[in-house]
Image (cartoon, helix red, strand yellow):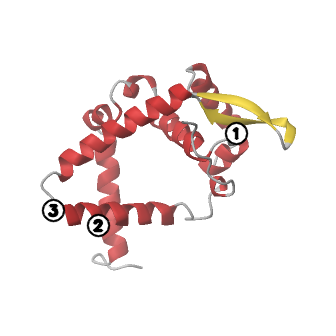
Amino acid sequence: MHSEDSPAHRVQEAFTHLLRWAHRGDVRRSLFGAAEAALSTNDITLLRAVTTHGPVRASDLASWQGVDKSTITPQVRRLEDRGLIERQGDPGDKRAALLTATDEGRRQLATLDDQGALLFAQALHDWPAADQHALATLMQRLADGLADVPERSALHVRPRVQPRA
């Protein structure tokens, strides 16, 4: 059991506060702009996973999300129907398909990332540059560490593929 002033407790409390903040309607609109109406948070998360880790199998996405493949299939189909991801044959297994982001999917994700960065730039505008850099480094370190908690993510099994230029 952690005391209320332990670093783990303070991080958990701050994380809970950040989650509440991120789910507010005005924040979602600022973070996601026009995509907020068309894409769910899960759609954006899956698009980011396919863009970052693709080509990737739907079964790997399901494992990463902690759901059955039958749950991920309609979510993937929504992204395909919007032209954000596409299927291609898996050269290692002719029965399987790999998912990759389309140029439009990468473009929309880049737009979302730019909007999100602008929101955080506004929140951090009066912080000293050294504090901004330290926060960015520590947040990335935390995010990387959480990828293996409670267990290693299925998406870490495949090497990251750089998007086409």
Q: Name which of mark 2 and mark 1 comes first in the sequence.
A: 1
Residue 106 appears at what percent x and percent y? 50, 33
Residue positioned most to the right:
94
Gap in angstroms between the C-alphas marked 2 and 3: 10 Å
Q: How crowded is mark 2: few (under 14 residues within 10 Å), some or many (20 or more)?
A: few
Residue type, numbered disc 3: Pro
Residue that mark 1 sits on: 58
Image depth: mark 1 or mark 3 in front: 3
The span from disc 2 to disc 1 (Cα, nearest Å) is: 36 Å
Is residue 4 placed above or below 52 in the rendered structure? Answer: below
The quadrant of the picture occupied by the C terminus is top right
Occupied quadrant, residue 114: top left
Q: Where is residue 8 in the image (x, y as percent from the top left)?
A: 37, 73
* Residue that badge 3 annotates: 128
**Category of crowding for the residue at label 3, using alpha-carbon neighbours closer than 10 angstroms: few (below 14), some (14–19), many (at least 20):** few
Q: Residue at x 22, y 65 (%)?
A: 131
Observer able to see residue 2 = yes
Question: In x, y percent, where is residue 72?
Answer: 65, 36
User: Secondary structure under badge 2?
Assistant: helix
Q: Marks 1/3: CA distance?
A: 43 Å
**Residue type, label 2:** Ala
